[in-house]
């Protein structure tokens, strides 16, 4: 046994060394076969002698038991981020600002990894806890998931206690693979590597995370003085020594704005060939004494800043303008172009919104157009390269008839609509909406599967979801549908029957009734019958409901077909009751707007928010004249300053608690 224990130690050491060389240094010294052999030997010993399995064994990386939820964890010190800047002038201004305090500053310049930040806690060199940033004060415990990331050392080279921060990200290769998998399963693809990383690290089942190929780049030690480090570049070297992946080949040291500009343009030219996504650079004053002198503003460190690359514009050829029909019958022209890579994802389509937009941009089939990602996610057509236009191009012309059912379109404001309530396109979109995540949340139904089922005739209206089990046998022959996925799908359909009322209200697709309003209505009326028996006046008495929404709801509930549909759903045993907490009317909170700032100690942010909402109030992110009161925790930020400046009521967390306790008086 002792021999095996010694062998386990030897194998772990070998595997850790090999992983470090492969994942962190990108410089392997053993072959994949040799690696597999030692890994399998370790696995065999651990299977035979489970008591020899070490906490930091690399075999722990495959993922463990699925969780019910993520626990909340309070960070040892707030996880801040830097202010963003976008151009050379702002870089200059930053350099000047620093030079007012520090005579001859040196800056580290690092690629800004495009993922999400994470904090890792090691005790005596062993990974004990990993957390997301969350709101900066409280994050979520993602330890099991982080353990599956191969470049995260489970054991450091030194037996020290340390917190390490860095970016959890997805390489371009893993991103493409994840999206290929999603596509094959008929699931919605990730919009970009950042969303893919965030979605993958927030999986309750770490076995799924393990398949996604996430990565971790270390870049920050919150308490460098504990390890006698004198500068950020020493911190980065120390992280590498401890076994972390760092950007040691790309990071640099510079002295002034000019050198920063050079670093940026060099990095920008390397960007397309880098294996991971970056969206700018991060600049940090290198010397830690200097950092201390500069300190923090109410919100962010003064000693660093993040420069974001301008959105990349890519040229391509407009092949077609394709019109689609939405759930409400709205017609949308879409630009279909030769697919191009923009900021890490392949895009071939962008919305052109409506006729006016097309005319204003003067888009024509055959044009060379430039594409970029608006808000980093949604592709948009920036402009037409008029100088490259073919002389025989034809002006955009809006269609007059529905592309699906040929009904003559009608125009309302800037938009065209198909007025045919029985237009198949409207039905398909309605079915997709019904099953979607925020509505009935029927998992396993990609848009294209719904379309296929509609075309085959399995799904014509929403009640058909609940008859699908009839086709269980025929479903197995459909491409991409294994027995397990059919069982999962049917289970998910069955589970959706017990959703709380607000999901059903949203799923029905009543015009102007989004997710939020659906919740307001559900909690107000408590059950479907009360809603069906309401009138315009009663609806208008609800603070969040204005004329347009009230009219739309009344139109919906007075329509016989809709009543029939709801009755059928009732007969199918769908839950028609609100299962959340009742919104109690309370004059201190009802209809009022609150902002939370600083770190709360009595409640978590989510709890405080939920309490406010359960008494009829709402929470927003920013302070304005419309804010009723700002609830202030420890170390409040700029929102507190702004509230004071605007003369808005300020409640301490204790006062907030007292008001909640008195609420029923
Ligand atoms: S340092 C006090 N270094 O960009 C801020 N951040 O605002 C400590 N990021 O939210 C962060 N690459 O998620 C740092 N090399 C890098 C980074 C980096 C990406 C992210 C980080 C943070 C934001 C900076």
Image: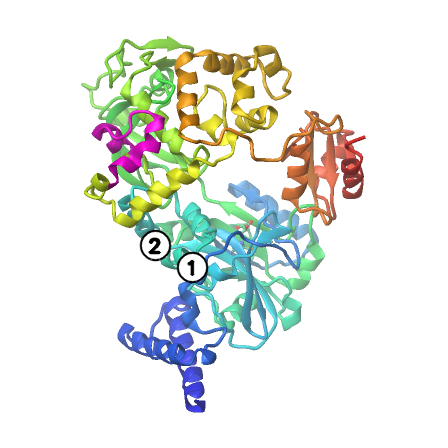
Q: Main secondary structure of the magenta part?
A: helix
Front residue (pair 628, 385) = 628
Q: How many marks can you see? A: 2
> What element does badge 2 sit on?
helix
From the image, tell me which residue sits under label 1: 215
Q: Quadrant of residue 457?
A: top left
* Residue 173, horizontal then vertical, whole percent: 32, 54
**Left or right, residue 27 beside residue 550:** left
From the image, tell me which residue sits under label 2: 174
Q: Quadrant of residue 35?
A: bottom left
**Left or right, residue 473 beside residue 503:** left
Residue at 23% x, 13% y: name it. 406
Front residue (pair 218, 289) = 218
> Against 525, is 560 above or below?
above
Where residue 436 is drawn, which disc sits there?
Answer: none
**Left or right, residue 521 beside residue 435:** right
* Residue 254, horizontal then vertical, whole percent: 53, 58
Q: Is residue 462 magenta?
A: yes
For the residues bearing labels 2 and 1, Cβ distance under 8 angstroms = yes
Bounds of the magenta segment: 450-472
Q: Quadrant of residue 647?
A: top right
CA gap between label 2 and label 1 equals 10 Å
């Amino acid at each position: 046994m002792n021999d095996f224990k010694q062998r386990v130690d030897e194998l772990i050491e070998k595997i850790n060394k090999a992983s470090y060389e492969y994942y962190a240094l990108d410089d392997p010294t053993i072959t994949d076969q040799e690696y597999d052999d030692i890994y399998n030997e370790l696995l065999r010993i651990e299977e035979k002698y489970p008591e020899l399995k070490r906490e930091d064994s690399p075999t722990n990386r495959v993922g463990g038991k699925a969780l019910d939820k993520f626990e909340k964890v309070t960070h040892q010190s707030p996880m801040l981020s830097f202010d963003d800047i976008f151009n050379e002038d702002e870089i200059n201004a930053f350099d000047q600002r620093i030079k007012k305090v520090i005579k001859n500053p040196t800056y580290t310049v690092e690629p800004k990894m495009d993922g999400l930040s994470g904090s890792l806690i090691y005790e005596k060199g062993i990974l004990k806890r990993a957390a997301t940033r969350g709101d900066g004060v409280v994050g979520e415990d993602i330890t099991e998931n982080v353990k599956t990331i191969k470049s995260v050392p489970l054991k450091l080279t030194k037996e020290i206690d340390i917190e390490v921060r860095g970016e959890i990200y997805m390489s371009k290769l893993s991103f493409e693979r994840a999206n290929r998998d999603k596509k094959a399963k008929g699931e919605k693809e990730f919009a970009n590597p950042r969303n893919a990383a965030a979605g993958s690290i927030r999986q309750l089942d770490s076995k799924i995370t393990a398949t996604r190929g996430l990565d971790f780049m270390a870049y920050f030690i919150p308490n460098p003085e504990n390890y006698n480090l004198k500068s950020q570049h020493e911190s980065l070297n120390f992280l590498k020594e401890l076994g972390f992946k760092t950007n040691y080949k790309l990071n640099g040291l510079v002295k002034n704005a000019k050198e920063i500009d050079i670093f940026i343009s060099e990095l920008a030219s390397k960007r397309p060939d880098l294996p991971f996504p970056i969206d700018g650079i991060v600049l940090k004053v290198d010397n830690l004494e200097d950092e201390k002198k500069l300190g923090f503003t109410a919100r962010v460190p003064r000693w660093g800043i993040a420069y974001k690359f301008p959105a990349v514009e890519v040229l391509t050829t407009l092949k077609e303008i394709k019109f689609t029909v939405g759930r409400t019958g709205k017609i949308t022209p879409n630009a279909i172009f030769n697919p191009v890579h923009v900021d890490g994802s392949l895009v071939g389509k962008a919305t052109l919104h409506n006729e006016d937009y097309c005319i204003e941009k003067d888009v024509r089939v055959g044009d060379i157009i430039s594409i970029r990602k608006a808000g980093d996610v949604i592709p948009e057509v920036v402009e037409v390269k008029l100088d490259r236009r073919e002389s025989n191009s034809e002006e955009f012309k809006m269609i007059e008839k529905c592309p699906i059912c040929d009904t003559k379109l009608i125009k309302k404001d800037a938009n065209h609509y198909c007025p045919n309530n029985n237009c198949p396109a409207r039905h398909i979109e309605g079915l997709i909406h019904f099953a979607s995540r925020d509505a009935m949340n029927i998992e396993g139904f990609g848009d294209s599967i719904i379309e296929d089922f509609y075309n085959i005739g399995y799904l014509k209206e929403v009640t058909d979801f609940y008859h699908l089990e009839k086709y269980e046998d025929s479903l197995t022959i459909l491409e991409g549908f294994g027995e397990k996925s059919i069982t999962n799908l049917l289970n998910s359909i069955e589970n959706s029957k017990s959703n709380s009322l607000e999901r059903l209200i949203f799923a029905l697709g009543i015009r102007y009734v989004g997710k939020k309003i659906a919740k307001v209505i559900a909690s107000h009326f408590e059950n479907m019958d009360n809603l069906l028996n309401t009138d315009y006046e009663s609806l208008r008495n609800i603070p969040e409901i204005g004329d347009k929404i009230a009219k739309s709801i009344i139109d919906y509930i007075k329509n016989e077909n809709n009543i029939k549909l709801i009755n059928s759903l009732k007969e199918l045993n769908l839950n028609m009751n609100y299962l959340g907490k009742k919104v109690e009317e309370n004059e201190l909170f009802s209809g009022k707007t609150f902002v939370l700032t600083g770190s709360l100690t009595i409640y978590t942010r989510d709890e405080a928010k939920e309490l406010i909402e359960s008494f009829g109030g709402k929470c927003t992110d920013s302070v304005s004249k419309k804010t009723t009161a700002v609830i202030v925790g420890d170390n409040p930020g700029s929102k507190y300053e702004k509230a004071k400046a605007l003369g808005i009521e300020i409640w301490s967390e204790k006062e907030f608690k007292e008001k909640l306790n008195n609420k029923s008086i």
